[in-house]
Image (cartoon, rainbow, N blue to C red):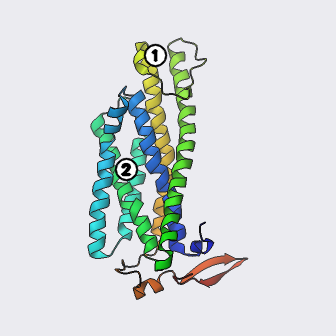
Amino acid sequence: MIPPHLFRNRTITLAVVASIAVGVGMFGASVFLGQYFQISRGESPTMSGLMTLPMILGLLVSSTVTGRIITNTGRWKRYLVAGSALLTLGFALMGTLRYDTPYWLLGGYMALIGIGLGMTMQNLVLAVQNTVGAHELGAASSTVAFFRSLGGAIGVSALGAVLGHRVKDYIAEGLTGLGIPAAGSGSGGTLPDVHTLPAPIRLVVESAYGHGAGDIFLVAAPFGLIALIAVCFIREVPLRRHTGDPIAAEVERESTVAVGGGAAVVRTGIGQ
């Protein structure tokens, strides 16, 4: 069970909000990009996974490099802000996605998303760990991870619903343009095998899924913006080297919470 008093800590609360938004991006991008490559580009499942490597490599490199820099400098907030901004930009650019988008351009967009995820995902956990006592490290870290997974689950479901609705509309529109009745054109629970479709209908389906995939990234972009706003309000404290460093006791000692029409100062400390 998540200790409720953790949410009196402003850093934890803001990190949770940002983690939910990051979860939408991390899980949504990985799930729907695979579908895009299979349906809109006719790739095999294996090749679809390989084609997402720019995002994975971006995540790997950025998380490794920023981790080393943060260890050396003790400053971490700038990377949360930059990562959230890149994540939002990557989602917005992916909103232009179509079935015939050049792969080199798509690879650049995926790399932006990966770099943004690498700079935010683990550093949100780090920010939380930097503000709590040793006995609460596990609870605080798992809280952020839990809400990131929750955001991913909600994001995949919500974005999947948007994708299904948009693809159905685009397919119906495309078939109508070909003079074909659109009844039953909606996608089912399995991915269609575009290779078995006649060329004109195949083009309609590929175009519909490409356009629909772009739409869901446009929907995801505001979540990146939410993460950006949240991390901007996180108070930065230099990275502590040990869990018992005195500087941790100064972090989030006073959190303001609304009480009726006014406000009250709650002494949270780090050991609640």
Q: Say what amino acid the circle numbered 1 marks.
A: Ile
Residue lying at 48% horizontally and 44% vertically, measured from the top left? 218
Q: In this orientation, does residue 132 appear?
A: no
Residue beneath disc 1: 201
Residue shown at 46% from the left, 55% from the top: 22
Judged from this view, the residue extending furthest toward the bottom is 246
In the rendering, at what x and y percent does residue 130 appear?
A: 42, 76
**Which corner quadrant holds the C terminus?**
bottom right
Residue at numbered disc 2: 113
Type of amino acid under label 2: Ile
Q: Can you say whether 227 is above or below 25 in the image?
A: below
Could you tell me residue 176's position as x and y percent?
54, 16
Depth order, front residue of 200/2: 2
Whether tag 2 and tag 1 are in contact, CB under 8 A, the answer is no
Quadrant hosting residue 264: bottom right
Rendered location of residue 3, percent (x, y): 60, 71
Can the viewer see residue 207 in this picture? yes
In the image, residue 49 above or below residue 203: below
